[in-house]
Image (cartoon, rainbow, N blue to C red):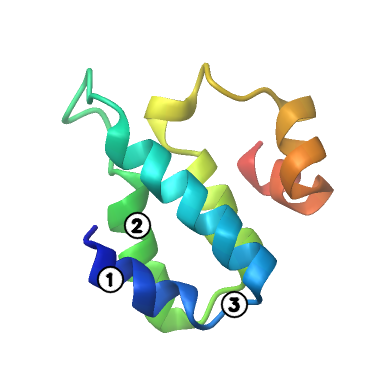
Amino acid sequence: MTLATESVLLTSFPKKEQEQIQYLIRQLLALKDSAPNRRPKATDVIKILYPLHVDSHCILATLLSDSRFEEKYNADQITARYGKVVTHLVQ
């Protein structure tokens, strides 16, 4: 995902959600990929979902479901930062 793609994605959401999405995208882009073919990358999936006009909860849950985040966040951390809806979607 490029910064240009990220900018287009972010403009359709309120500022708080923009910041949350941007934070997760940047974290994902900074992570090394230990298993490149394990499953689709969240940044690739949100490029598919975005034209379907999904809400920010769906985008956040997709990003948090990336295999590279599996051990980084637990349900309590996700709920505290992103809310119960996102936590439910991730699980």
Q: Is residue 76 left or right of residue 66?
A: right
- Give the image quarter of residue 20: bottom right
Q: Quadrant of the C terminus?
A: top right
Q: Residue at x 21, y 61 (%)?
A: 2
SS at circle 3 = loop
Answer with mark 3 or mark 1, whichever residue precedes in sequence.
Answer: 1
The residue that disc 3 covers is 13
Tell me what residue is drawn at x 71 percent, y 36 percent: 78
Q: Residue 3 in the image: x percent, y percent?
A: 27, 64
Residue at image location 28% in from the left, 43% down from the top: 40
Question: Any mark on residue 34, and which?
Answer: none
Please name the residue that numbered disc 2 is placed on. Answer: 45
Pick the residue in front: 77 or 47.
77
Q: Amino acid at mark 3?
A: Phe
50 or 29, which is in the foreground? Answer: 29
Q: Quadrant of residue 55?
A: bottom right
Q: Is residue 11 left or right of residue 36?
A: right
- Please report contact status of discs 3 and 1: CB closer than 8 Å, yes or no: no
